[in-house]
Image: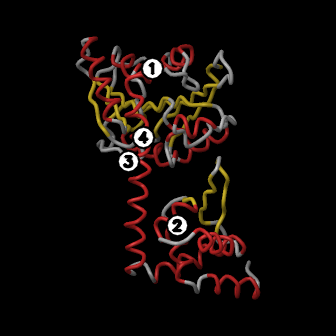
Amino acid sequence: MIGPSGASRLLKSLADESRLRILHLLTQEELTGSDLMEILNMGQSRVSTHLALLKEVGLVLDRRAGRHSFYTIAPGPGSKLLQSVLEEARSSPEFAADLAGLAIVREARLAKKRAYFDRVAASFGEQLLPGRTWEGLARSLLQLAPRARYADLGIGDGLLTLMLAEVAERVTAVDISASMLDQLRQRARAKGFENIVTVEADIEELPLDDRSHDVVVLSQALHHAHEPLRALREARRVLVSGGRLLVIDLLAHHEEWVREKLEHVHLGFTEQDLSQLVADAGFERVSIQRAARDPEPPHFMTLVATATRKP
């Protein structure tokens, strides 16, 4: 419950147009201070001052990830008042312009990710990649035996896609990088596979039909997602009732260099966090296990999560 003093401070914080625009953007998704500066065309000190005040009155939370601070709307009684205030201004031209700016920031984010994978596509399989071990892949694939319709989201070098094609009725290979997909098509032709369909798309927004696949695989892809929960919900959407999910990713670690060098957005996941994400996405019978530990330093640990879509 908010007291009179807190209510007064809260109302004053909502009386500023710039702060309302910031809050409106943060209701869309988690953003950095740099994102807000670009969208709102504001200087760093001005944005920082507004964010500090919004944190002080309990409307905004922040978290540190590497060199960046990410901001989001704080839960609590203030968020209900905020929703009412924002609803009144929902159709304002300022909010519309901010949403257009947010779309540009999202596209720039995707372009950066796409550029990285396009750049390394030809030599991707030769790089040292965290959590990428044959033992981890093999142990994970043991859980995928049926001849079915698979979706491989975020294909990387395509090794897992090709292995799935050996047992699948069809494999839909989704990746943001056209070059990665081209490399896969070349290798598939060389091996004589005709059951691989390639789709250039972001794993957080799949151009695939609802309930069109029996198994969805995210192998070392979820840590690249800006919003992992959104990617998992998309995976659920394209699965048939009772369809299976397989996630292969990294156990939470502290190797910050992977953010800049390998475009990782998240430094892996704890068992508890990954389990909660999968459950929140609408899956049941969630199982998490540690599959393998890289033999070379820094000895990344691979997690395997399996789950079933609720009917």
Q: Residue at x 44, y 24 (%)?
A: 124
Q: Nearer the viewer, mark 3 or mark 4?
A: 3
The Cα atoms of the two marked residues, 3 and 2, are separated by 25 Å
Q: Is residue 132 depicted above or below 115 in this figure?
A: above
- Please identify, in this view, whether the residue under mark 1 or under mark 4 is nearer the observer: 1
Which of the pair 170/26 is nearer the observer? 26
Q: Which mark is residue 235?
A: 4
Q: Give the quarter of the figure containing the C terminus.
A: top left
- Residue depicted at x 65% and y 38%: 256
| Residue occupying image coordinates x 62% and y 75% | 50
Please tell me whether mark 4 or mark 2 is closer to you in this view: 2
Amino acid at the residue labelled 2: Met
Query: What amino acid is found at the position of numbered circle 4 in the picture?
Result: Ala
* Camera-side mark, 2 or 1: 2
Residue annotated with mark 2: 37
Report how far apart the C-alphas of labels 2 and 1 lie in the structure.
37 Å
Q: Is residue 264 left or right of residue 151?
A: right
Q: Element under label 1?
A: helix
**What colour scheme was applied to this rendering of the protein?**
secondary structure
Question: Where residue 177 appears, x then y in whole percent?
Answer: 35, 36
Residue linked to disc 3: 205
Q: For the residues labelled 1 and 4, say whether their Cβ atoms are less than 8 Å apart.
A: no
Q: Residue at x 30, y 44 (%)?
A: 207
